[in-house]
């Protein structure tokens, strides 16, 4: 039997989907340290840290540099480069991140 | 413009102008209305004092980083950990006010002597500090300070080392 779609039902489904999406989205905040710029945007909790990092350049309108590092934000920044395959949800569960504040900074040398 | 193996040049007027330009940008990106809100102080026109912490075995140690802008922004700010009571660093009396940092991106020396007979000084060995260039430290081309960098780069690099490789205070 063919399924009937009414405009009302489609609208209700669309709203439900949007609501569901919102439930699984968070606002991430990213500071580009070297350029002194910041951006905030929504990402699904199943986005990986790599995807968030990639999207950050688009949102910031800044070109990626080869020695850039993705790291946590705040006063105790830690590199996230060995955790880029984790999703936001996994990173939070595993306490790799405490919140959704991030930073991008070029590597420095000192050894 | 900063270059490897070149002695930095002091330009106080340019340093002050660049600090005045960069301070509002940094405050805006940190969502802070003033330096007071961040716990920072500006004891002179050309310096900032930035409180920092390092945690080892659950114990939190407090430090004060002094940034100096006498050669800024062609060169990075001077960066020294100082005695919080005096705002100065005198070796060896004040070396316990210096955190031991052992990150490949940022290491600290409570005392550093470039060669025999040279001045003994504290060195935060990081390509985002003025002293790193003053001692003619070797540096990879991609690590050299860029004109677009600001003192936020310096603070963040040192904070990252404190978060990842803090080994306690110097004795």
Image: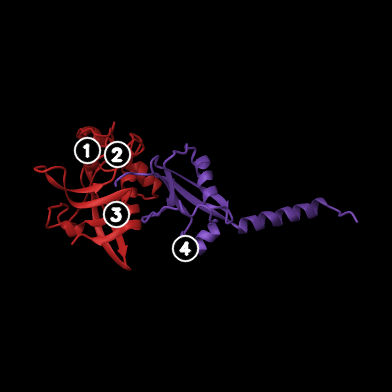
Chain colours: A purple, B red
Q: CA distance from mark 2 to mark 4?
A: 34 Å
Q: Position of residue A83 (x, y in %)?
A: 48, 55
Label 1 or label 3, whichever comes before in sequence order: 3
What label does residue B22 carry, if any? none
Give the residue at mark 2.
Answer: B139
Circle 4 is placed at which residue position? A95
**Are the numbered discs 2 and 1 placed on the same chain, yes or no?**
yes
- Quadrant location of the N terminus of chain B in the rendered image: top left
Residue for point 64% across, 55% down:
A21
How far apart, in angstroms, are the residues tagged by discs 2 and 1?
A: 9 Å
Mark 3 chain: B
Q: Which mark is residue B136?
A: 1
User: Do the residues indicated by labels 4 and 1 lie within the same chain of the protein?
Assistant: no
Q: Nearer the viewer, mark 4 or mark 3?
A: 3
The structure residue drawn at horizontal position 24% and vertical position 55%, both measured from the top left corner, is B64
Front residue of B78 and B126: B126
Looking at the rendered image, the disc whose residue lies closer to the viewer, 4 or 1, is 1
């Amino acid at each position: 039997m063919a399924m009937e779609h009414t405009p009302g039902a489609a609208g209700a489904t669309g709203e439900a989907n949007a609501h569901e999406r919102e439930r699984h989205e968070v606002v991430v905040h990213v500071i580009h340290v070297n350029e002194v710029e910041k951006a905030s945007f929504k990402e699904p909790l199943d986005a990986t840290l790599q995807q968030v990092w990639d999207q950050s350049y688009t949102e910031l309108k800044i070109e990626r540099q080869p020695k850039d590092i993705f790291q946590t934000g705040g006063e105790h920044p830690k590199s996230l480069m060995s955790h880029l395959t984790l999703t936001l949800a996994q990173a939070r569960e595993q306490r790799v991140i405490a919140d959704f504040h991030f930073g991008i900074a070029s590597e420095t040398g000192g050894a | 413009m900063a270059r490897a193996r070149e002695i930095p040049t002091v330009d106080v007027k340019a340093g002050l102008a660049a600090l005045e330009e960069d301070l509002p940008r940094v405050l805006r990106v940190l969502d802070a209305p003033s330096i007071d809100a961040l716990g920072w102080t500006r004891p002179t026109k050309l310096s900032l004092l930035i409180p920092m912490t390092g945690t080892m075995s659950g114990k939190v140690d407090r430090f004060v980083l002094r940034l100096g802008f006498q050669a800024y922004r062609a060169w990075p700010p001077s960066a020294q950990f100082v005695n919080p009571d005096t705002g100065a660093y005198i070796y060896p009396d004040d070396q316990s006010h210096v955190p031991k940092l052992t990150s490949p991106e940022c290491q600290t020396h409570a005392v550093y002597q470039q060669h025999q007979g040279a001045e003994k000084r504290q060195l935060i060995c990081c390509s985002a500090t003025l002293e790193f260039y003053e001692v003619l430290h070797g540096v990879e081309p991609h690590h050299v300070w860029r004109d677009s960098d600001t003192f936020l780069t310096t603070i963040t690099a040192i904070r990252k080392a404190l978060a990842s490789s803090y080994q306690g205070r110097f004795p």
